[in-house]
Image: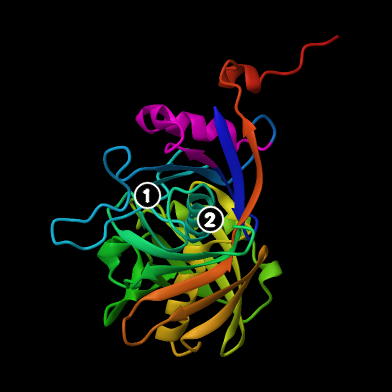
Amino acid sequence: MRFTKMHGLSNDYVFLDAFAAPPIAQRDDLAALTRAVSDRRTGVGSDGLIVLEPPGPPGSPGIADSAGSPGPHARMRIYNSDGSDGERCGNGLRCAAKLLVERGHAPAGEVRIETTSGDVLAAFAHADAAGRVQRVRVDMGPPNFEAAAAPCDLAKIDHDHTNPSHVRIEGMNATIVSVGNPHVVVFLDTPLDRFELETIGLRVETHPAFPKRTNLQIAHITARDAVAVRTWERGAGATQACGTGACAVLAAGVRLGLLEREATVTLPGGDLHVRWDQKSDRIEQTGPAVEVFTGEWNEQVSPDERISPTSPT
């Protein structure tokens, strides 16, 4: 099975192209496959797996909907490294747009991608003279601070009754926000490297108030238009970057009066430019997309064999 490894700011994914190999879209073992390929010792190594497939019958990407509006060029299924549903991924969306354009599955310019939730997001991918896409801008849609959108069970968490998006968790004041997937955002006065992300991140992810688990973003503001972020992603753990998380941090910062509507978000893997348009209420994130390599996954080797100790010689 052919695969492509890609990353956005070191947030890396294994991509499967179901345009070129349609049977991939029909597989019922993608969660198990994700766990196998994501293993950094016995697999390819990644934060998850993404399947790109046509949105309708083969050969009909970009079909219009019943109202005549342009339809998506592709459908995108995201799996976290533990095999769970990723719902939405900003870095993955940028990489998906690059792959779709460079392989001729979508035209350069506006690439419309449908997520598993049914939302269609626009990615703007312009190719250079060599036909390569280096940077991509993605319209992530409006942020949602409603508890039901996360979802968050407010009965199981301390919260501000006049503003339920403000909660207290693990002794920290936080903001809950959905950007197509759930986030808890915490602003710290202290440097981020002092924060025990690996310990606290898992406790926040699995807190009883979040029935679908949640992502955690810890942030340290360095200017009105600049913020440093570390991220804990549900189903993947600490990652080098999170595109939706960067959008969630900007939205929470603006809501609290801490950030301007346009800022540079610095993650361990690099910088994202994030903008929350006041008129449209939509957030855009812009950053790089990189293809690392393409290879063949040996499906003759079972997951059990991959994790077995090497036999003595």
Does the magenta portion include 301?
no
Is 255 located above or below residue 39 in the figure? below
Is 218 displayed left or right of 155 in the figure? Answer: right
Is 55 located above or below residue 101 in the figure? above
Does the magenta portion include 39?
yes
Query: On the rendered image, what quadrant is the N terminus found in?
Result: top right
**What type is the residue that disc 1 sits on?**
Ala
Residue at image position (47%, 64%) is: 244
Between residue 186 and residue 99, name the one nearer to us.
99
Place of residue 26 in the rendered image (x, y in percent of width and height, measured from the top left): 35, 29
Is 69 displayed left or right of 87 in the figure? Answer: left
Is 308 displayed left or right of 207 in the figure? Answer: right
Asked where in the image residue 254 lies, by quadrant, the reply is: bottom left
Q: Residues within 10 Å of mark 2 (few under 14, many from 20)?
A: many
Element at label 2: helix
Q: Residues within 10 Å of mark 1 (few under 14, many from 20)?
A: many
Between residue 302 and residue 93, name the one nearer to us.
93
Residue 47 seen in render: yes
Place of residue 68 in the rendered image (x, y in percent of width and height, measured from the top left): 17, 61
Place of residue 24 in the rendered image (x, y in percent of width and height, measured from the top left): 42, 30
Magenta region, residue range: 15-40
User: Which badge, 1 or 2, comes first in the chain's sequence?
Assistant: 1
Element at label 1: strand
Asked where in the image residue 130 lies, by quadrant, the reply is: bottom right
User: Which residue, given by chain and number where applicable, does mark 1 sit on?
Assistant: 74
Residue at image position (41%, 75%) is: 283
Between residue 155 and residue 163, name the one nearer to us.
163
User: Which residue, given by chain and number where applicable, does mark 2 sit on?
Assistant: 98
**What type is the residue that disc 2 sits on?**
Lys
